[in-house]
Amino acid sequence: KRPGSAKHPGSESTPGMDPFADTLQRLREAFVSGRTRPAKFRAAQLKGLSLFLQENKQLLQEALAQDLYKTAFHSEVSELILCQNQVDFALRNLHTWMKDEPGAKNLMTQLDSVFIRKEPFGLVLILSPWNYPLNLSLGPLVGALAAGNCVVLKPSEISKSTMKVLAKVLPRYLDQSCFAVVLGGPEETGRLLEHKFDYIFFTGSPRVGKIVMAAAAKHLTPVTLELGGKNPCYVDDNCDPQTVANRVAFFRCFNTGQTCVAPDYVLCSPEMQAKLVPALQSAITRFYGNDPQRSPDLGRIISQKHFQRLRGLLSCGRVVIGGQSDESDLYIAPTVLVDVKETEPVMQEEIFGPILPIVNVRSLDQAIDFINRREKPLALYAFSNSSQAVKQMLDRTSSGNFAGNQGFTFLTLTSLPFGGVGQSGMGRYHGKFSFDTFSHHRACLLSHPGLEMLNNIRYPPYSDFEQKL
Ligand code: NAD
């Protein structure tokens, strides 16, 4: 029988009181008791997650529709299926992942047993953002639970409806002595971060990533930071413009452009730009009709604050497609900008909306130079009919993830690690990488209690030995 409704620390805090202390203490005690370690317990938590997804599908779809105007289909493909895949994959592989891994031996350790033990860190904190509020909460949670940790999840306060479902319903499916959802915005999260955790997994902006890392440093807590940034998209002159336009427009506008790995800007020649702009117009009309505001497949901007920020970006460069906005509806039309200057805000900050600037470059070399002069992006896209050109882009740049002639389908694979590099983050997850992220890899050597003769050789004095050298 499932326990009753959970309390949500942080939701009503009394001044002077620490709203999180009791919860964290309870979770720490549960971890020390060792109950999260057995495979059976871990599998039960993962099955609980799976059941949560199945039994609350409609509730989750409604919450995602309220928060992000997602259709049921969109919620399914961008959130629910991805979560379910991660859970299923972890359940299928849990026993294999948990096994000690034998280590190679040298002459001195021939008679010893040498292996890597994957042990849980202890108490883990997961902080998630609002743009895929379910997937970016449950995705890391799968890894943390599979690895045998106790977990505190702090979902984004901005995606309110999903946050409520996670806080009210999810704990009923998990062991509440080992798992808790806590609530709060920047202030409460700041207080939460004063506590010592054994691992912190953060998904969000680079600005807050720095705050999280600084707080973690006080306790020497290891972190994974899944951050964002500007993802370049190079388009070679030899491409078919319509094929590229379909793929770029689709991945730029997916979730109304509010995706950390979305192509942020296009780099191409003026000649390709002349062909690409009408092709992008045709793709946008095909996907969202003549009036995209009426399309059920285009969402809305999450908040007034982000709407205002995006509306400001529409004044950069020259609008060649879209450009309309409606504050009462938090609507920004799919928009393409040309003639943008590198110094304008649209080329300085992560766009995070359905706006695509095009920057002109004369060659592949110039595009590579443009990319390498900037922070390392989370994703880098290269479109070309020449596999050599795609390979050059891959070989001569760095990014968290890379795709040739495609959008961000790489993140649907449990076989690939997902994570940033440099300014776009540190650490990785998905599939087995999640399990490894949340496990300490403990080096173990078990020796024989006897056989002292073999050990005698390494004890001082060394004078006899030195004379022989
Ligand atoms: P955010 O950094 O504002 O918030 C993320 C989390 O941090 C939330 O839970 C929020 O409550 C908390 N937070 C906010 N301000 C805080 C503060 N001052 N102190 C402590 N905690 C604080 O990010 P967001 O707006 O929710 O999400 C958008 C950003 O996340 C974009 O930059 C995007 O690229 C990035 N992102 C990255 C990935 C990835 O996988 N790499 C995925 C999604 C989003």
Image (cartoon, rainbow, N blue to C red):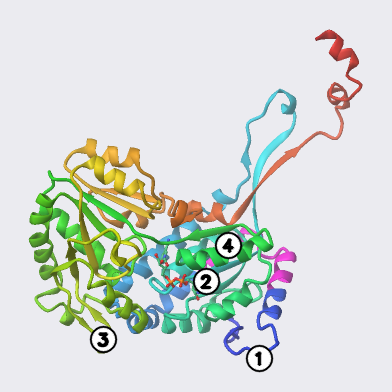
Q: In the rendered view, would you say 259 is above or below 311?
A: above
Query: Which mark sits nearer the N-terminus, 1 or 2?
Result: 1
Q: Position of residue 135 (x, y in %)?
A: 42, 68
The kind of secondary structure element at disc 4 is helix
Residue ID at (53%, 63%): 210
Return the residue at label 1: 14
Q: Position of residue 187 (x, y in %)?
A: 57, 80
The kind of secondary structure element at disc 3 is helix
Q: Which secondary structure type mostly characterizes the magenta part of the structure?
A: helix
Residue 48 has which mark?
2
Query: Which mark sits nearer the N-terminus, 4 or 2?
Result: 2
Mark 2 neighbour density, 10 Å: few (under 14) some (14–19) many (20 or more): some
Structural distance between the alpha carbons of marks 4 and 2: 31 Å
Q: Position of residue 440 (x, y in %)?
A: 63, 52
Q: In the image, what residue type sits under mark 2?
A: Gly
Q: In the rendered view, would you say 67 is above or below 409?
A: below
Q: Quadrant of residue 182?
A: bottom right
Task: Give yes or no for residue 233 being in the magenta stretch.
Answer: no
Q: In the rendered view, would you say 189 is above or below 401?
A: below
Magenta range:
27-47
Determine whether label 2 and label 3 are within 8 Å by CB: no
Return the residue at label 3: 327
Q: How many marks?
A: 4
Residue ID at (22%, 75%): 298
Task: Give yes or no for residue 44 being in the magenta stretch.
Answer: yes
Nearest to viewer (mark 1 / mark 2): 1
Return the residue at label 4: 213
Q: In the image, what residue type sits under mark 1?
A: Thr
